[in-house]
Amino acid sequence: MNRKFNDETIEASSFILSKVFKKPEIHAILFIDMISVTIPLTNEQAGMFYGLQKFRTADYQFKLTHLDGKDAGLQKYKRRLDANFSDGSTLSIFLFGLSEIQNPVKIYFNPNRVRLRNAATILQLIQDLLGHCSYQLSMLSGNVTRVDYALDLPNVPFRHLITDYAYSPSYYPFFEHDSRTGYRYGDKTGCPISAYDKAKEQGGQYLGYSKYTRIEKQHKPRARGAKSMFKVAEMDKQKYSFQGLRFYDPNILLKMPNRVYTLIEQYGIGKALSLIDGPDHRILKKKMEKYRLARGASFKKVLENTYQERMNNLKLLLTEPQRFIIDHEM
């Protein structure tokens, strides 16, 4: 397959990425893409959640699912109560863990998909069930079990994104009709980083862009050990910046032989370098040194500050949902 790159589109992507590294808060889109929290309640309190099913409006309705077999094993819970919203989004509540040491309630949703007011409406119903004080104290003591944070690059074709990851030797590419549409560093059971063609995933266009690349990391505190685990009360103290992810200027692709690019697609650029020798090895090594984009202190700081703001907003949503309902009504 001929993978010749167009000089003008490469230059355009190079220009965008250079701006992203100078001012990511302006030229990239930074957001939290998933949050999962387990709440320390009694089984009796967890049973009270069944009462949510009586609430139904034009904006949302609840659906209860009994989990068994593979589904129960995957989620580690026996029941799933979904708040399905009219816009197609869902906030999920898992009840009664398979193990007695688990918190009996887990709340799981995508803040980038579920509108904050919709999430606040459901959380307010839960607060009304448990009582304000009990709800707030329990929520602040809840364990954050997963946070997905993402960086979107509008107008950057996925094939122009060349990265390497210092903390994981594992690389898994995804192909569709012989074309790479994404890749993942690390195993799913850990804290993997993924990059993929968001426009392709959405049928060819996303938010009006035909070229749209997403990078995201799944942070699972428990997978990183006890020292990495944190409570809802500590959400705004977390620092995320895609540490260890190295970026290369898309100009690295110009005049690259197909045989070399094919190896990069299949194994990642770091492994590809180790698989080639002779002139190809020397040329690629020099290009990697020349075109590696510097992650300055300001880039890291902006990412950390922006994600902290997003996490603080979610902390407020989880602990004081009424604020988001009132704010939207004013």
Image: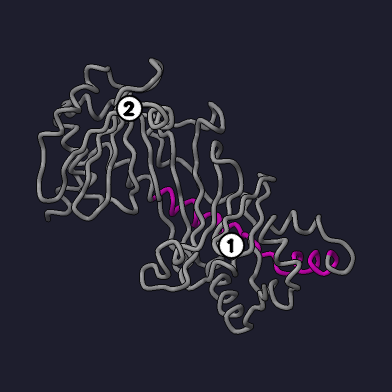
Residue 251 placed where, x, y %?
67, 75
Task: State left or right for residue 205 relative to residue 153.
Answer: left
Q: Label 1 sits on what residue type?
A: Arg
Task: State left or right for residue 330 relative to residue 105.
Answer: left
Q: Nearer the viewer, mark 1 or mark 2?
A: 1
User: In this orientation, which residue lies closer to the viewer: 327 or 2?
Assistant: 2
User: In this orientation, which residue lies closer to the viewer: 242 or 169?
Assistant: 169
Task: State left or right for residue 73 relative to residue 4.
Answer: left
The span shown in magenta is 281-309
The residue beneath circle 2 is 39
Q: Earlier in the sequence, mark 1 or mark 2?
A: 2
What is the secondary structure assignment of the residue under circle 2? strand
Does 36 sit above or below residue 183?
A: above
* Residue that lies at the very extreme toward the bottom in this rendered image: 8
Specify whether residue 87 is painted magenta.
Answer: no
Q: Residues within 10 Å of mark 2 (few under 14, many from 20)?
A: many
Q: Label 2 sits on what residue type?
A: Ile
Does 65 sit above or below residue 156?
A: above
Q: Quadrant of the N terminus?
A: bottom right
Quarter of the view holding residue 98 = top left
Spatial CA distance of label 1 from label 2 is 40 Å
Q: Residue at x 35, y 47 (%)?
A: 110
Q: Which mark is residue 197?
A: none
Does 265 sit above or below residue 244?
A: below
Q: Residues within 10 Å of mark 1 (few under 14, many from 20)?
A: some
Residue 211 placed where, x, y %?
47, 72
Q: Which mark is residue 180?
A: 1
Residue 178 placed where, x, y %?
60, 64
Quarter of the view holding residue 290 = bottom right
